[in-house]
Image (cartoon, helix red, strand yellow):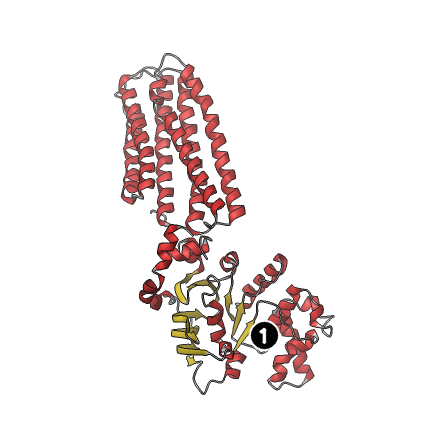
Amino acid sequence: MVPRQEFTREMAELHDSVIELGVLVNERLVGCVDTIQNEDAKTARRKIKEGEKIIELERAINNKSINIITKQQPVATDLRVIISSIKVSYELLRISENISNLYKVRKRTIIDNDKLIIRLRTMEKLAHLMLVDVKTAYDEQDIALLKEIIDRDSDIDALFVQITTSDVFDMPDSFITGQSQLAAKYLERIGDHIKSISYQVHFVLTADHLK
Amino acid sequence: MTPDTKIETKNIKKQNIVSSTDAGTLSNDNRKNVFSSKNFNLWYGDNHALQDINLDFKENDISAIIGPSGCGKSTFVKSLNRMVELVPIVRTEGQIIYKDRDIFEKSFTKEELRTKVGMVFQKPNPFPKSIYDNVAYGPRVHGIKKKKILDEVVESSLRDAAIWDELKDRLHENAYGLSGGQQQRVCIARALAIEPDVILMDEPTSALDPISTIKVEDLMKELKKNYSIIVVTHNMQQAARVSDTTAFFYEGYVVEHDDTNVIFENPNDKRTEDYVSGRFG
């Protein structure tokens, strides 16, 4: 008889739920900048609505984690995985909220400045690649890749600084300027949350906090 | 048992010949050792039950010993006060040092050793006597006759065992009339009455209910201020809750000995992790 079959099954379910949450958040992220320049606001409204599923899944992961801790009294790697599942799912929820905020920008206005859109789209792509690579680093236990992902957040930060401080975008309308800077801020925050997930994955893999 | 575990345990003896020498020694701690075993081996007849045990136990620590049934943890603890020698076919090699003296030296009698090293067993084992006589038994054997001194020893031992307030008006009742948890704390008081330095505990709460267990655990944390405690336990959570260091025994070897936090959060050996997480044993 395999010992602790139910515990092993519950841990596998928890793992799958966190991966599912990551996939759903990534799907919400991809194309969000295209949506804020889209004539039709319906997509933005639908995407905002879809954020509710992320909230439900994050709560389910928390409840599942608490339940496993209560019933199974995990230690060592198991406990790290559970605690990190709670933290990672929270970071994914925060990413999702920032994505919703981006879609809300579209409900208020259309941003169609090409120079600006190119940079926002680059920020989105960088964030998307970071998120995908975190999953790869976890699957392959690649510590070097995790450190690289953490460093790559500075690329997103640099674009944010450029958008908020440069006057090359020729933005005549102060309201649109403000909304553009908010969009950039949301993407910059998404990068920060992915960086936090990388730290958490590093803790799961090594039991050590990356400085 | 998972396939991984099979592979791990299959090669255990070979791995431990290399690792057990260092497995038990904790570094960066300047406190004195109350007990040190050095290349300690024990046989029951032809059965090599303990193999090259090298362990240091620091004073005023609670040191837990964990491991599956038959791994040698109780045998090792009973070696520390030489109780294991009650088994006629036992043979030992190596050293167990108690405060700079080898306990197997001819000049170090078992009686002298056992005044320094008290023991509490799995099941409460009070004598069929009054609570007072149970606690006063050890001091009387050591020649204390004066009632005033015995009264003081009984009171201070029961106070140290955190049971004085419950029993001070029942001292002359038979100890068998107490609850299991109370009996066990009386047994702890009886061990304290001879003023030992070390208290050995062999699964001291396995026969107790959860409330009594917590009381004994709280008592252990209080006692470590004045005593060193070495406790064998099958209860992983208990080892995690009460101990400062934990040694994991497997098939007569010490697989890993480290701070309890390390053993339960990030053990170095996969067998330790598998055991503490309940995946084998």
Q: Which residue is drawn at 63% across and 59% down?
A: B209
Lateral position of residue A118 relative to residue B182, left or right? left
Residue B99 spot, x, y in % from top left:
44, 78
Residue A79 at x, y = what percent? Answer: 45, 48
Q: Looking at the image, how many numbered discs can be counted on the residues?
A: 1
Which sits in the foreground, B172 or B123?
Answer: B123
Q: Mark 1 points at which residue?
A: B191
**Mark 1: amino acid:** Ala
Residue B65, percent from left and from top: 47, 65
Left or right: B272 as drawn, with respect to A145:
right
Q: Residue at x 50, y 60 (%)?
A: B239
Above or below — where is B247 with respect to A102?
A: below
B46 vs A78: above or below? below
Residue at disc 1, secondary structure: helix
Q: Nearer the viewer, residue B102 or B84?
A: B84
Residue B149 in view here: yes
Chain ID, mark 1: B
User: Circle 1: is it few (<14), some (14-19), or many (20+) Cα within 10 Å?
Assistant: many
Q: Find residue B17 and report its image quarter.
A: bottom left
Residue lying at 37% horizontally and 31% vertically, measured from the top left: A190
Percent from the top left, x then y, of residue B185? Answer: 62, 68
* Whether residue A108 is visible: no
Q: Which residue lies furthest to the top in this view?
A: A39
Query: Is B3 located above or below residue B100 in the figure?
Result: above
